[in-house]
Image: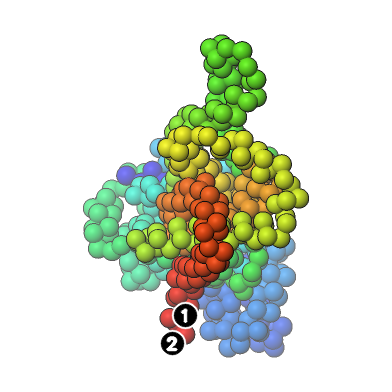
Amino acid sequence: MSDVILFDLDGTLTDSGPGITRCVQYALQSFGIEEPDLKKLECFVGPPLKESFMKYGGLDDDQAEKAVEKYRERYQDTGIFENEVYEGIPELLQFLKERRKILAVASSKPEVYVERILEHFQLRDYFTVVSGAELDGRRTKKAEVIEEALRRLGCSRKRQNVVMVGDRLQDVEGASSCGLLCVGAAYGYGGREELETAGAARVCDTVEELRILADDLGLEKKRKDHIRRMRPDRTVWLGRNESDRNVREEERETGQSEGESTEPLGAEEEETDIHIPFRKKAWRIVKPVLTYECCLIGASIFMALILMLFAGPGDLTERMYRTSVLVTAIAGVIAIPFLWKQLQGDEGMFPEMERCWDPLHAVCSILLVMTFGHLLNTLMNVSGFTAIFSGYEQMAENIYEGQNPILLILSVGVLSAVAEELVFRGMIYRRAKDFWGFRWGMAVSCLLFGIYHGNVVQFVYASLISILLILIYEKTGTLLGPILAHIAENVWGLYRRSLMNFLAERSSGAVWVILLLEAVLCAVSFWYLFLRKEADADK
């Protein structure tokens, strides 16, 4: 059974041919090309617009871009409404809604136009989600639009009960790339032959025939055959992380639209701005860190009560310092299950990341953060930056001095590292990246991670380390990467100062040898993780 049905717009819900062809005619006239027969311009309905101007209009790349601009000049106010709903569509949508189907629109037309058209024809209320392209050229390929619709519906990983309905081969191919079946609407602009050749699971000649979507008669077997026959295209499923995991605007392959097309632009994404108010975004960003902070505060209050009730007279502040590591461990044990549950709640909301994880990647991730952390710490000490804020050193000594080594490693080294990665990379970074793009996602995560540490020295240190942890997360495609690296860095950070002092007492050159070795390991690890493919490609 298909519980979720995605509809194309042009040629499926509405007959948009007149508006599109007249706008194409208008754009071609600006280049001195006259085509009075609008029927001949119907080839522009469905395929990528810029591509069509080059293929059918004989324009070069620059001319095609200008043609798109001229097209929109007429389309945005006039052509958009030279359009009509196919007879029987409102009744079909009402019929499907009554049978508890979840309906959505997935169109490569710019989303703002799709919304206006649906509102104009009073169809918008039938659809839970409307997904389309962006005016600046992002999310224009059909598969990308479908993936965005699935993400907004929360069924990126539950797509087995989703079906696409469209009239052109782009709809069939886009659906197939995303692991979906496509039911063809032959009454549109593609026709039965085009849809069958493309591999539509079933082709309906009329709107009335689409009522099959209510019971999926005959589709279930085809769905199973489809799943056995092919594996969905993971380059589409991975979406934002396939081409360049470090720059979000380059992570998507740019494509073209049905009746609309623009060039790829390097702009930060704000895919869901029209759907999620800023206050809700802010709440989703701060909720994980507030959860962890509440656990820390609760554990501290609990420990203070225990000390006041059972420890006898004495300085409470000093006792809290002595038990701070135990408090951190208790908070970690309490917080991690809650944080994990929040993280699981994000499942299916973001495109899957390409997993690039093996023992060598793990070793390089750990070595990179450990060595970079020590080199950065050394630089901050040598430059005198740490001395400016000397209170931090005294605070660290008060907290860690005399603590049980096993408890210290368990608490600071393991539990706090796991909790912090769940919060700052697993949720805050992924959510901020989804709202505002890679760079802003990194900035928000690093800023909050620095503020969380509560002092200037740790703010600078943690923010810079956070950049590396995010890059490792993007590279490896698994949160296990930054978790292991963070654990190793925390454990190494607890004892490296004592080790370096021990070596310095015995040989003044030993410290420099260690630092040089760390610099080499840091460079090699960074090269292996982030530069190796580029280096190999140049050969």
Which image quadrant is residue 476 in? bottom left
Q: What residue type is labelled 1?
A: Ala
Q: Where is residue 214 in the image (x, y as percent from the top left)?
A: 36, 44
Is the C terminus in the top left, top right, bottom left or bottom right quadrant?
Answer: bottom left
Residue toward you, 428 or 24: 428
Residue beneath the point at 73% across and 51% down: 387
Q: What element carries label 2?
A: loop
**Between 178 and 334, the one nearer to me in the picture:** 334
For disc 1, the marked residue is 535
CA neighbours of label 1 inside 10 A, class few (<14), some (14 to 19), many (20+): few
The x, y position of residue 231, in whole percent, is 30, 62
Colour scheme of the picture: rainbow
**Is any part of residue 383 visible from this angle?**
yes
Residue at (23, 59) in percent of width and height: 228
Q: Is residue 459 above or below residue 21?
A: above
Residue at the farthest front position: 506
Q: Is residue 16 left or right of residue 492?
A: right
Q: What is the total number of numbered labels drawn onto the structure image?
A: 2
Where does residue 316 sit, x and y in percent of width and height? 63, 20
Closest to the observer: 274 or 382?
A: 382
The location of residue 182, given as percent across then percent down, is 37, 59
Q: Which residue is drawn at 55% across and 21% down?
A: 303
Query: Residue at horizontal 45%, vertical 38%?
Result: 405
Task: Examine the image and state in which quarter residue 229 appears.
Answer: bottom left
User: What amino acid does circle 2 point to?
Assistant: Lys
Q: Residue at label 2?
A: 539
State whether residue 104 appears in this view. no
What element does badge 1 sit on? helix
Q: Which mark is residue 340?
A: none
- Local crowd at mark 2 within 10 Å, few (<14), some, or many (≥20)? few
C-alpha separation, residue under disc 2 versus residue under disc 1 = 7 Å
